[in-house]
C-alpha cells in the first residue's frame, strides 16, 4: 500500500510539472518581479492540488502544504542560480523528488520492509554486475576508443566541425542502448540502432572528399559497438 502512495505522489509531480505547466506560466516564472513570484506560487499550488487529489486523503493537509512551500522555494532558487541549464533542471527535479521521498518515508513507508529491500539490493551481486557494466560502457569505453582510433584521426578540421562533446555523448547513449537491448533479450534492437546511425551518417560520409574520414568514423562506430557487445554478452552470461 505504501508503494502505491509513493507512485501517486510521483505521478502528481510529473502531471503538475510537465503536463499542467503551460508555456505562458513557465515564461512568467522567469520574470524578476511580482508577476514571476505569482506564477511561481500558482505553479506550486498546482503541485499541491495534484498531490492532494491523487492521494485522496481528504483530511491530510501536511503533504500538499509541504509540497507547496518546498516547490515554491526550490523553483525560485533554481531560476536564481541555474536558470534553464541542464544542471538546473536535474538539480530541480532531484530536489522535488527528494522532498516527496522524505514525506513518503516519514508518513507512509513501512520502514522495516524498505530496509529489508535495500539490504537485499545492496548485497545483490546481480545488481552490482549490472551497475559495473553500465559504467564500463560509458567513460572507460570512451577513453579506450579514443586511444585506439587516435592514430587515425584524419585532421583537426574534422574535429572542429561537430558540436563539442556531442560525439562522446552519442557513444555513451548508443553503448547504453546496446547493453540494455542485449540483457533484456532484444538483440534485434542493436541492428536497428546500427542501421539508424548509418542512415544519419550517410549524408556526411557521402560528401566526404577523403576516404580517410569515412574509415575513421566507421572504425570508431565498430569499436564502440564491439566493446558494448562484449560487455553486454559477458554480463548476460553472468546473469544466466
Image (cartoon, rainbow, N blue to C red):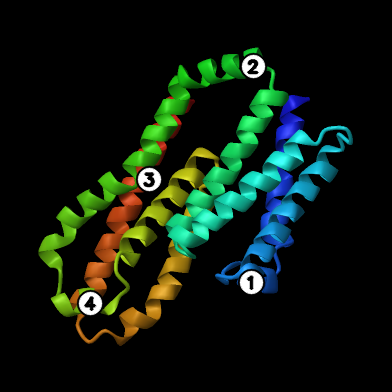
**Left or right side of 165 for 77:** right
Per the rendering, the mark at residue 129 is none
Mark in front: 2 vs 4: 2
Q: Residues within 10 Å of mark 1 (few under 14, many from 20)?
A: some
**Distance from the alpha carbon under mark 3 to that under mark 2:** 40 Å
Give residue 203's quadrant in the image.
bottom left
Q: Quadrant of the N terminus?
A: top right
Whole-angstrom CA distance, mark 2 to mark 4, is: 54 Å
Residue matched to label 2: 111
Q: In the visual, does 161 lie left or right of 53?
A: left
Between tags 2 and 1, which lies in front? 1
Q: Which residue is mark 4?
A: 160
**Numbered disc in front, either 1 or 3:** 1
For the residues bearing labels 2 and 4, Cβ distance under 8 angstroms: no
Find the distance from the CA under tag 4 to the CA under tag 1. Answer: 38 Å
Kindly identify the residue that appears in the image at 58 percent across and 50 percent down.
73
The answer to which of 144 and 197 lies nearer the viewer is 144
Amino acid at each position: 500500500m505504501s508503494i502505491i502512495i509513493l507512485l501517486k505522489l510521483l505521478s502528481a509531480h510529473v502531471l503538475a510539472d510537465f503536463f499542467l505547466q503551460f508555456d505562458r506560466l513557465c515564461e512568467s516564472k522567469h520574470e524578476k518581479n511580482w508577476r514571476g513570484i505569482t506564477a511561481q506560487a500558482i505553479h506550486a499550488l498546482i503541485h499541491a492540488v495534484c498531490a492532494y487529489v491523487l492521494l485522496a486523503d481528504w483530511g491530510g493537509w501536511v503533504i500538499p502544504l509541504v509540497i507547496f512551500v518546498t516547490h515554491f522555494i526550490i523553483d525560485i532558487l533554481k531560476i536564481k542560480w541555474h536558470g534553464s541549464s541542464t544542471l538546473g533542471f536535474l538539480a530541480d527535479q532531484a530536489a522535488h523528488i527528494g522532498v516527496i521521498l522524505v514525506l513518503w518515508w516519514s508518513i507512509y513507508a513501512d520502514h522495516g520492509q524498505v530496509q529489508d529491500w535495500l539490504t537485499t539490493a545492496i548485497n545483490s551481486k546481480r545488481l552490482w554486475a549490472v551497475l559495473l557494466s553500465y559504467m564500463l560502457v560509458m567513460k572507460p569505453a570512451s577513453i579506450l576508443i579514443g586511444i585506439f582510433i587516435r592514430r587515425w584521426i584524419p585532421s583537426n578540421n574534422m574535429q572542429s566541425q561537430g558540436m563539442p562533446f556531442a560525439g562522446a555523448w552519442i557513444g555513451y547513449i548508443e553503448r547504453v542502448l546496446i547493453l540494455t537491448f542485449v540483457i533484456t533479450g532484444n538483440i534485434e534492437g542493436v541492428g536497428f540502432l546500427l542501421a539508424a546511425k548509418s542512415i544519419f551518417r550517410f549524408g556526411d560520409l557521402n560528401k566526404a572528399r577523403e576516404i580517410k574520414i569515412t574509415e575513421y568514423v566507421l572504425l570508431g562506430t565498430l569499436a564502440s559497438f564491439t566493446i558494448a557487445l562484449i560487455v553486454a554478452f559477458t554480463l548476460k552470461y553472468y546473469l544466466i
